Amino acid sequence: MDRVLAVDLGGTWLRAALVDLRGGRILARQRCATPLGGPEPLLEAIDALIARLAAELADHGGDPIEPDLPIGLACPGPLDPDSGTTDGLPNLPGFADFPLAARVTSITGRYCRLHNDASLAALGEAWLGAGRGYDPLLYVTWSTGIGGGIVLDGRLFGGAKGLAGEIGHLVTQDGGPRCALGHAGCAEGIGSGSGIARRARARLAQPDGEGVALAVALREAGAAAPDAVDARTVSRAALAGDPTCRQLMREAARATGLALAGAVNLIDPARIVIGGGVARGSWSQLMPELQRSLAQSVLAWDRRAIDLVPAALGDDAGLLGAARLLALERGTA
């Protein structure tokens, strides 16, 4: 098996690719906006993207997609990778206890292997990206949410139930803000893109001078209304000098650094790779505070040895990791 199909289900985009396993080259790629109307539109979109991949190959004289090529599917959690079932996706309705892998197989006629998107991004970075040659590897995706994956001996370490690596749900502030899953005080509720935006909107509602000044700063940063506030506008306002936004970004970096410190003390990774939209968009702004909180909280003799770098594969990490997982499990890696 030299080629596989890979699909990455994101909150904004649904991506599909045909991947050459011999060198990790993406031979064809397609994407569409992620359907938000429930499982059926999503399943139809996956099938349509695979058809578009086949058409792209035909247009460029490539080999046709074999009918038995399997699909590796990267999906946000919570999910059970062993059963291929999702347990409710925070931004997509209708996926509670949903047999996604089986339904993809039913509509496409192809075997489907489902796994957590952050874990697969970890595997992709370990295979071809910034984590290549580093083992164990800790990968963190810092985006709308905060997730992670652990690669040990070249393979994903999933723990007893495939849930290892959920660094965003390490508690960093007792009784602190809740994440999208309702957990209080975890790093995701404070430091994720959605957490930053949610906390900024809460500050806007304060009936005092801070709320008024913040509204002006965010408007100048591109958020004309509260529902337009996101991590990017908070970051821009912080860079422009708004004190509330600067505090929110510092707290986001500190919470994420504390979560990383817990993971470092537990795993002792050879390298930490950080990807995701929040990290990419605000790296130089976030890293000083993150590095401080990380250094203050890891074991003293480990402080000089922490190797932390940005991810190298961008949006392709999950696709390549999904392909790599199929290769490893089928003995063709």
Image (tube, rainbow, N blue to C red):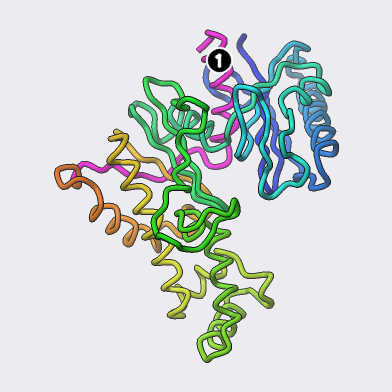
- Residue 225 among magenta residues: no
In the picture shown, does residue 75 fall above or below 112? below
Instruction: Find disc 1 in the rendering and name its residue.
Output: 327
**Which quarter of the figure has residue 267?**
top left
The magenta stretch spans which residues? 304-333
**Residue 332 sits above or below residue 13 on the image:** above
277 and 111: which is toward the camera: 111
Foreground pick, 67 / 186: 186
Magenta run includes residue 318 = yes
Quarter of the figure with the N terminus: top right
Q: Where is residue 61? Give x, y as percent.
A: 76, 19
At label 1, counting other C-alpha atoms closer than 10 Å, the crowd grade (few under 14, some 14-19, many 20 or more) is: some
Q: Identify the residue shown where x is 40% and y is 60%.
A: 173
Foreground residue among 327 and 129: 327
Q: Is the magenta stretch mostly helix, strand or loop?
A: helix
SS for callout 1: helix
Q: Where is residue 142 in the image (x, y as percent from the top left)?
A: 49, 50
Choose between 134 and 77: the one closer to the eye. 77
- Residue at 76% x, 46% y is 93
Q: Position of residue 215 (x, y in %)?
A: 59, 82
The reply, left or right, for residue 114 in relation to residue 173 is right
Q: In this view, does 36 lie to the left or right of 208?
A: right
Type of amino acid at the residue the image marks with label 1: Ala
Return the residue found at the far front: 175
Q: In which quarter of the image is residue 284?
A: bottom left
The image quadrant of residue 132 is top left
User: Does 254 sit above or below residue 98?
Assistant: below
Residue at 53% x, 42% y: name it.
Answer: 314
Residue 91 visible: yes
Q: Residue at x 20, y 47 (%)?
A: 303
